[in-house]
Image: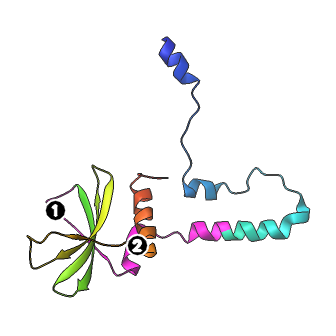
Amino acid sequence: MTKESEELKNVPDCTYPSIEEVCEGLWEDVEIDNSHQPEIDLIEKSLTSSCENMKTADELFEELGYSLVQTLLDRDRIVYQIDQIPGTSVDEITFWLSDKGYCKELVDVNNDCMTPMAQEIRIEEHLAITQKMRELGWIK
């Protein structure tokens, strides 16, 4: 065994469990004073409920009115669209897989030469974007 591999063996594992893994093992090995059981039951119910009710990014985007656009030519992006002005412009939230980046733009559907305009991201959109980044493995 080389010196480097011996040193790496002593490096702590820095991976973190997913939300599902945390929720799955909730309260399993914890010894708790029963005098606080009502509060503990309430907390456990709340956490378990949150884990069971997690929605996918696709579900969150759909609730906001966005549609997933399948792009056969460009497999490096995932695009969600919503009509801003029907038949004229759409808001697009695009995820670039190779760059691990995203943006929201207003796009004119009748003019391919128009420069897309950056748009503000609402809180609800931010939550859907964050969930998508979790699903893609970009964040934990």
Q: Magenta stretch: give its range.
A: 47-75
Q: Nearer the viewer, residue 70 or 96?
A: 96
Q: As displayed, is residue 19 above or below residue 15?
A: below
Residue 1 visible in the displayed image: no
Residue type, numbered disc 1: Leu
Q: CA distance from mark 1 to mark 2?
A: 25 Å
| Mark 2 secondary-structure assignment | helix
| Mark 1 secondary-structure assignment | loop
Residue lying at 76% horizontally and 71% vertically, measured from the top left: 42
Residue 49 percent coordinates (x, y): 63, 71
Res. 72 mark = 1
Mark 2 lies on residue: 125
Q: Nearer the viewer, residue 126 or 63?
A: 126
Q: Nearer the viewer, residue 72 or 84?
A: 84
Res. 91 mark = none
- 10 Å crowding of disc 2: few (<14), some (14-19), many (20+): some
The answer to which image quadrant residue 20 occupies is: bottom right
Residue lying at 15% horizontally and 77% vertically, measured from the top left: 108
- Left or right: residue 50 compared with residue 70: right
Q: As displayed, is residue 38 above or below residue 29?
A: below
